[in-house]
Amino acid sequence: MPAPHYATDREPCIPVLFLNGRQEYLGWRDVLLHAHLIQDLALPLPPAASAVLRLLVAMAARVSGLDAQAEGRMTARQWAQRRRDLLKNPGGFDPDAVHDYFDRHVWDLFHPQRPFLQDPRLAAQCTKRAGVNKLVFGRPEGRNLAWLSPHTDTDPHPVPSAQALWHLLIHHYYGAAGQCSVRTVGGRSLGNAKAGPLRSTLSFHPLGRTLYETLLAGMPKPSRLWPDAEDRCPWEEPLPHPDPDNGPDPDAAPPPVSSPGRLLTGRSRHAALLIPSADGRQVTDAYVTWATQKKLPALDPYLIHHVHASQSVIKRHKPRLADADRALWRDLDALLLAGDEDDRKGKTGKAGDYTVQRPDAFTTLNDLPPDLRAALRVRVYGFDQDDKTVNRTWYTALTPPIWPWTQEHDPAAAERIAECRKAAEEIGEHLDTVSKSAWSQVTSPAGDKAGRPPRGLPPWTRSARTLYWPRAETTFWALLDESARPARAAFAADAVHALRTATRPAIAQHFRAAEAIAHAVAQLRRHRH
């Protein structure tokens, strides 16, 4: 019987949406060959789509020559001109370059020596498999309750190989920190993994009219700050040593991060090995463990970073975290302002605690042709997680074409967006404060020692928040067309409406409610200016 195989460059494993509306599954090779005919990716799992885009950008850099490896380092001007020339090509990427690149590497998910994005030595280095439920996000594992799916560890169902690839990518980019399968390397056993490089983050990607434009627009720019070390993606590395005792040293420094290969595809801190069915169509089990105990510091080009000037160089840049309760429009000004023009409030509550840095991939969009710039939208992928093991939810969003509003093209529009976002945030914070205070006055009046403040948010605050932010979003977009209308007054009116609506039933239920609510409304109105 032939050994199982699943060649990800040819097997239908990446769902895409063509310009004519047809949806189809393609391998990596065909995705690049048809990128100019594809509208967008169609992956149902946002964190997998975020990972796939990064891999495709790295592959596109190789086949297009924009990685500057083939011809030596290009200047920024030469690189920008080469990208513009490529964007003029209606036929997309050069088919010969695509085939040449994919023919030089191994893409088989179950290759005995180099399984794609896996470490074959885990079979000897790990005494216990993690199970297919550990591999697949959303399935319960161990003794956890089956909240979201009917799967159990007593009867684990195989997963199709295409979907196994998606979940493998999620582990590499968004994997959990903490206990994992014990892996023994060089006589030392460890069973603790570090968090993936994108864990709990919010990822922003320029979206063109075709996938071809998306990949070229989102290409990280060359920089002399990157080391001169040879830049390799994991599938481009030399074959791993067959001896399992020659695995990674957990105390050894990893290769320096270089761009775009290692930056986009080579910073995983997790290792995995998939166990296939006899025909390779399914994955029946898996090893999931640690890959390195060392950090691989780098600024991902698709994340908004908060820059804390008072921190050490290593800790200075912190990515903006995903929050499923936070609407996308509240991040627009961070994309549109060119740099450190706007101070934000940090966790300490002090103004100027950090400044905001737009994603690095956005810094070269001004070099794109005008028609593409005008059409560019932004695809957002978020995975709301804690920094250890809890996965809350994932989500995606899409902006309208926003690049004409950037500070470089329309400073007044960018500043108006920043002004409105800031006003909405400040009024929202004040709504939280006054609603909490009003609740406390009614439920725990002065002198009542038996009263206890509720844990978490009071119900008035929760309800007022829920009503305020959708209303504030409508107001935000209206304010962009009404430049003379005061932003603070508009959002204050929204906050007053939200608070009154949220507390209307309480006026008949609580003796002191009317007075406390009236005082809170008066405070909101005082913050209109």
Image (spheres, helix red, strand yellow):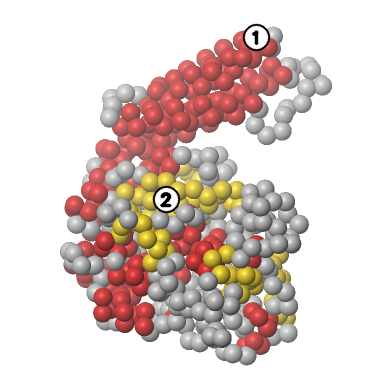
Q: Is residue 294 visible?
A: no
440 lies left or right of 239 = right
Whether label 2 touches label 1, CB < 8 Å: no
Quadrant where the C terminus sits is: top left
Element carrying mark 1: helix
Going from N to C along the chain, the mark reached first, 2 or 1, is: 2
- Give the quarter of the figure containing the N terminus: bottom right
Q: Residue at (33%, 46%) from the top-left corner?
A: 336
Q: Amino acid at mark 1?
A: Ala
What residue is at 61 percent from the left and 24 percent from the top? 460
Residue occupying the far right of the picture: 450
- Give the image quarter of residue 243: bottom right
Q: Assess disc 1: are there few (<14), some (14-19) or many (≥20) residues with their C-alpha within 10 Å of its C-alpha.
A: few
Image-based side of 147 in relation to 236, left or right = right
Residue occupied by mark 2: 380
Tell me the residue at 64%/26% (across/down): 459
Tag of residue 334: none
Q: Secondary structure at mark 2?
A: strand
Name above or below for residue 334 compared with residue 193: above
Q: Position of residue 120 (x, y in %)?
A: 59, 81
Residue named by callout 1: 508
Q: Camera-side residue: 405 or 37?
A: 37
Residue depicted at x 69% and y 9%: 511
Is the residue 162 above or below the residue 502 in the image?
A: below
